[in-house]
Amino acid sequence: MSQQRNAPGTDNAESGDYDPTASSMSGSVEDSVMDELLAIRSSIDNFDATLVYLLAERFKATQRVGHLKAVHSLPPSDPGREKAQIERLRRLAHEAHLDPEFAEKFMNFIISEVIRHHQTISATHAETGN
Ligand SMILES: O=C(O)C(=O)C[C@]1(C(=O)O)C=C[C@@H](O)C=C1
């Protein structure tokens, strides 16, 4: 049976209940101000969707790393790699006028989640061989 696929962001999971005009300020803000706010929020919505897709792709890549590490009995974390990544991202953040402290915290947040995934993959591999 053939399956109809929707373009990203147009399927019901994403757009079904989403109200881009949702706000707790409706009624207390001038129409022109609300119009400008909604226009800017439309860009924010696109950025947020992009972030989700980027993160999903990054996690797909790290899942592959997790399997490779599990199969070859390598440790989940690699502090040397992390140090190099953080230094590079701090430098990029500075150049992009993004707070390097924030960039580091954000990266560490993602990496700690990746390590948790690696540990789960490793435990599953030890138990089942998969
Ligand atoms: O490159 C690796 O070895 C990974 O496991 C990926 C990753 C990352 O998310 O970038 C996660 C954990 C490691 O400590 C270093 C980097």
Image: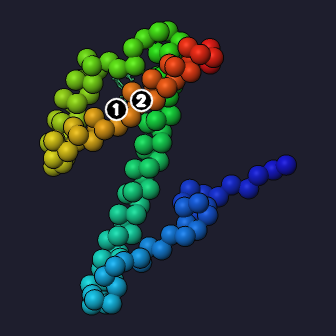
Mark 1 closeness class: few <14, some 14–19, many ≥20 residues within 10 Å: few
User: Please, is residue 3 above or below residue 103 in the view?
Assistant: below
Residue 62 seen from this side: no
Pointer 2 residue: 116
**Amino acid on which disc 1 is placed:** Ser
The residue at the point 50 percent across, 69 percent down is 18
Give the colouring mode of the picture: rainbow
Q: Quadrant of ligand 1?
A: top left
- Locate residue 90: give its quadrant: top left
Residue 21 seen from this side: yes
Pointer 1 residue: 112
Callout 1–callout 2 Cβ contact below 8 Å: yes
**Amino acid on which disc 2 is placed:** Arg
Q: Quadrant of the C terminus?
A: top right
Residue 123, disc? none
> What element does badge 2 sit on?
helix
Measured Cα–Cα span from mark 1 to mark 2: 6 Å
Image coordinates of residue 71 in percent, x first then y, are 53, 12
Image coordinates of residue 62 in percent, x first then y, are 45, 29
